[in-house]
Image: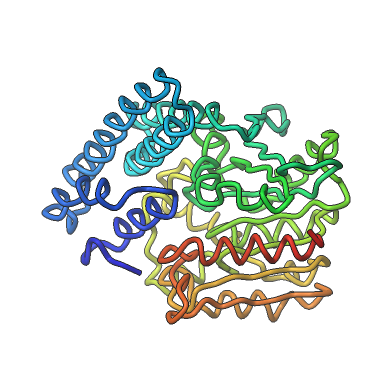
Amino acid sequence: MFMYFQENYWWSLMVMGSLGMGGEISEIDEICRPLRDVAGRNDDVAREAWFEGWSRMASRLERVARDRRDAGFRVSASRLFLRAANYQLLAEGMVQFGHNRKLQAYERALELFRQGIRLQDHPVEFVDVPFEGTTLPAIFVPATGASSRAPCLVHFDGSDDVKEITYLRHGLGFANRGIATLIVDHPGSGGSLRLRNLRARPDIETAASAAVDFLEQRPDVDPDRVGIIAQSLGGYYAPRAAAFEPRFKLCVVWGAIWDWYRVREGQGSTFEPKDFQVFRSSDRDEVIGLVRQFTLEGGIAERVRCPVLIVHGENDRQCPLWTAETTYDRMTGSPRRELKVFRLDEGGASHCGADVKSMVTDYIHDWVARFFDL
């Protein structure tokens, strides 16, 4: 993976993530070049500089987007709004929970994203999935040109992702292959965490089942062709959901994890601020106790009965390759499973393909389309 900040992996990962969502390298370089002097620091000064740089570029693009929209240029205005949302989401991600600025930045990013979506021709819907007395914010992306009920993937996030980022990573890759998606901010992510105060939980099948219930009520979705996909920490979420929700007909593990605590233990038991944030807790012992529950051990992986695709990078610095190999080896109940390891000489070898995002997403899109015979 290209390391824009040689001394800061996480900042470099976010830079690559922005590029994978449609960011422009010259704009990103303009944002990040002044940040090199503080990239080695992990303090409020560095976080403030990061926030200001990405927010400033988002504001600049928003002004241009409004001018394009007002002049009647919907396509270019949409692209600009979505790129502004991309940058604003990167700014928001650096703000710690508990700060008023975080919610303000998040709501601004949502509005930029919605404006960009409204100007597109593809009919994307913002929906709410009923769940335990409240709702899970979600985006429904219908299949392009479907004349009958289409297959659909429930798409969950990773540990600190939001549904808007997930949408920008895929674009219309699934839709243009005849596959709908329901991108859900499940407990511990996106709007469910920020607006509903629903913290991360190991029994993610509760949210997955709610998503399937929601899809079964839609006349444009084939309830017999519904699958689950998730990335990063979703390497636990997706197989866990498939293990306990038999209505899923396939499972895509985009970056395996197997056992969250073992992965952290292998990194010296380090815990990032985001690990505490997804649980809305500052109690280290509580967080460690919860993280220990995020495991596919105990016969969970063996319960999966649907076909499975596991994609992983050989140079993943967050989740070692053994996590993918173990996930594959232990899913003995699956009638068809594939482990696709992206190598350094082909691209997509970093965490969730951050180095060449499209290499991985295209492979996933094609695999799912072939599965559904589309």
Whether 291 is drawn above or below 130: the answer is below
Q: How many tags in the picture?
A: 0
User: Is 117 or 1 nearer to us in this picture?
Assistant: 117
Q: Is residue 224 left or right of residue 277?
A: right
Task: Report whether 312 appears left or right of 276.
Answer: right
Which residue is painted at 53% across and 58% down in the image? Answer: 291
Outermost residue, left direction? 37
Q: Residue at x 45, y 21 (%)?
A: 72
On the image, the x and y values in percent for residue 357 come to 47, 61
Name the foreground residue: 176 vs 278. Answer: 176
Q: Residue at x 83, y 53 (%)?
A: 225
Q: Nearer the viewer, residue 102 or 358?
A: 358
Task: Give the image location of residue 64, x and y in percent.
Answer: 32, 28
Asked if 351 appears above or below 199 in the picture, the reply is below
Q: Is residue 220 left or right of residue 61?
A: right
Quarter-wise, where is residue 108 in the image? top left
In x, y percent, where is residue 97? Answer: 38, 37
The structure residue drawn at horizontal position 67% and vertical position 47%, both measured from the top left corner, is 175
Within the image, what quadrant is residue 236 found in? Answer: bottom right
283 with respect to 206 (left or right): left
Q: Quadrant of the C terminus?
A: bottom right
